[in-house]
Amino acid sequence: MTLRKPWLLMEIKASEARSVWCGNGGAGAGGYPRWVILCRYGEYQGYERDDSFPPFSTPDAKTEAASVFSSGGHHVLVSLCLDAPPASSRVCFDFFPRIGGGRGASLAVVAAHGDSVLVRLSYQGEGYRYGDDGVLDYFVYNAGSAAADPPRPPSLSLLPAYVTTDADEEESETWRPRHDLDERTTGLLRRGEDDMVVVDLAVMEEGDELEEAELLVLRSGEWTVTRAPVVHFDGRAEKLPSWITDMAVPVGERRMCWADLYRGIILCDVDDVFDQNPQLRFVPLPPEALTDESNDDDDDYDDHTRKYVIAERSVCVTGGGAALKFIDVIPRCCCGRPGPTYCGHSTGAFIIKTWILRVDDGSGDMAWTMDAMVDASELWSSHAYAGLPHAIPEHPIVSIDDPHLISFMVDERESEGRYCRIKETWMILFDTRSKTLLSAISCSHGRNFLPSKVSSYFTSSNGSCSNGGAMSEPAVIIDKAPTHDAIIGDSVRISCESSGAKHFRVSGSVASPDEIFAALEEIPELSRHDLLRAYSMLCHDNGRRFKSLLGLPMSLRKTWLLMEIQTCEDCAVCCGCMTDLQNA
C-alpha cells in the first residue's frame, strides 16, 4: 500500500507525456536513403573475370560523374551503387585506355563528408615493370550539384599531388615521391558549398608520450604542413599516452576527430589551423573502456590483440554532426565478468555499450555519457533474430542521423577439421533504444566500411532525402537477394532462397505484476524510486524487457534497468506507443 500513491503519480506523468507526443516517423517521398554504408574498396567495371565471380554491381546512372583525366592521361569515370543500410553501397569506377586486362587498377575510399567522397586511384603507369611503384591519384567525387535546381551531374576533381623531398635527396630533381593519404589518418571536411579541406594527421611522440602532431592540409588547391601541440581537453598538464591512429571522423563543418580505439580521441578545429594557432585536444575514452591492453606499454604489444579489439570498437559521428558516439562490444562470462571466456555457458555472449560525446554544446565540458547497454540475450531472444548466428557482432557503424541505429557485422562460422571458416556474413541494423532488430542481409563486400550522406543529395530537396532504407516499417531481409519482409510485433516472416518462405508466429507468456515486483526486490541496492520506475516500465512492456532482465547476471541488472528507464523516459513512444504496436 505504501508504494501505490507514488506509483500512481508516476503513471499519470508518463501518460500525460505520451498523450502529447506527436512525432511523425515517416519521411518525404523519394528513392534514396538518408545515409549509406560505403565499402572502402571500389569496384572496377573494366575488370576481366569469368562466370565464377559474382556479377558486377549496377551503378545508378544519376550518380555518374563527368569524366576527368588522371595524371597519366586516362579518362576516369566514377559512379555509385547505392543501397539502404544495413546493405553496403559501392563506388564503381572505370578508366580508359585500360591496362593489363583490367587488373592494373584499384580504387579505395579514403574519406567521406557531406556531399563528397575522397578516393584514391592506383594504377600501373606507362613503362611499368614488376616491382615498380604504381601511380597514385586522388579525386574528390561531389554530388552537391545533383541537389541543385535544376539538378546537374555530380563532379569529379583531381587533387594536386603533394610532393615531398627527402633531405638526403634534396639535390635530385627526379626524386619526388607522392604522399600516401592513409584512410586511417586522413579526413575530408566540406565547409559550405564551395570550401573543401583535406587533413592528414601524423603524430610525433617523445618516448611513450604524445606531445605534438603534424597536420598536412589541402585547401584552395594548396598543400601546407603545420605542427600543433596536443593538450588535454581540460587544460590538465598530465602526460598523454602513446598513440596509434585507427580512424578519422569529420565532426560538423569545423572539426576533425582522430581516434585511437585504445586511448581516446584527438579533436582539431580547422579554423585554428587557418589562423596559424592550431591546438589539438585529447579526450580520453570513458574510464570503463580503458582496457588492460590499452594501458600496457611493454615491448610485448600484440598486434593481433589490437586488431581483435578494433573489430569490436568504433567512433562515429551522429546527430547530424553534433555528437560523437563510441561503441564497445565486450565479450562476457555468464557471471557478468567482462572479457573473453571459455565458459561453456557463455559461448559468444557479449554486452554492447555505447557512449555519446556532445561536441557543440558550448560548455566546453566534454565528457562521455553512457546512453545504451544491450546484452546478447536481448538481441538473441528477439524473434526477428531467429536463424541468425549467435556470435559477437563486429565493425559497428552508427547512423549519421539517428544515434540509436547501429549496423553490425555478424559471422556464421563452421568447423573444417581443426580449423574454422566463415560460412556466411550478415549485416544487421539494430535500434539500441527500442531493442529492435530492424533488418538483416547477407553481405559479400568485404569488412571495411564508412558511413556517408552522399546518397541524400540525389533528391530535389537539397540534401534532405526520404528515409529510403530508414525502415519506418522495420523489415527483416534474410536472403542473399534483398526481399523486404514485414515484422509486426511478435510476427516474423523470413524468406529463404533455397527452401521458400517460412512463416511462423512465436508467442510467450507475459509475467504477472507480482512476478515483476518480486524480481525487482531481489536486485541489490535498487532504490525505492528506481524500483517503482522499473516496475512501471516492465508492466507496460509485452514481456520482452522482463525476459531480458532475467537473462542477465544479477551484477548487471541494476545498471541495465537504469539505462532502460532513462531510454523510456527520453522517448515516450518507446514506453507507450511501441507497446501498443507490439501487442497489436
Image (cartoon, grey):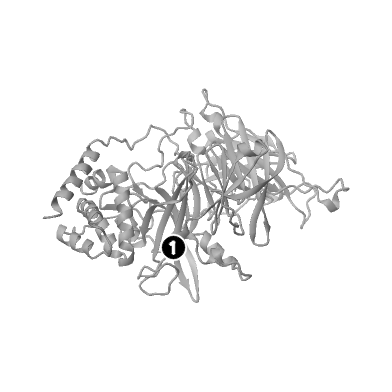
Q: Residue furthest bottom?
A: 418
Front one among 221 and 21:
21
- Estimate the x, y position of residue 44 in percent, counting from the top left: 61, 47
- Estimate the x, y position of residue 347 in percent, counting from the top left: 39, 70
Which residue is depicted at the point 24% across and 39% down?
Answer: 17
Which residue is depicted at the point 29% across and 51% down?
Answer: 565
Give the vertical position of 83 relative to 443 (above or below). Answer: above
Q: Is residue 181 visible?
A: yes
Q: How many marks?
A: 1
Front one among 420 and 34:
34
| Residue underneath mark 1 | 330
Q: Residue furthest right?
A: 171
Q: Is residue 505 visible?
A: no
- Estimate the x, y position of residue 177 in percent, counting from the top left: 77, 49
Which residue is depicted at the point 53% across and 33% down?
Answer: 62
Front one among 494 and 466:
466
Q: Residue furthest top?
A: 150
With 529 as the anchor, is 320 left or right in this view?
Answer: right
Q: Residues within 10 Å of mark 1 (few under 14, many from 20)?
A: many
With 260 as the anchor, is 389 left or right in this view?
Answer: left
Quadrant that contains the N terminus = bottom left
- Estimate the x, y position of residue 422 in percent, counting from the top left: 48, 64
- Tell me the element at label 1: strand
Q: Amino acid at mark 1?
A: Ile
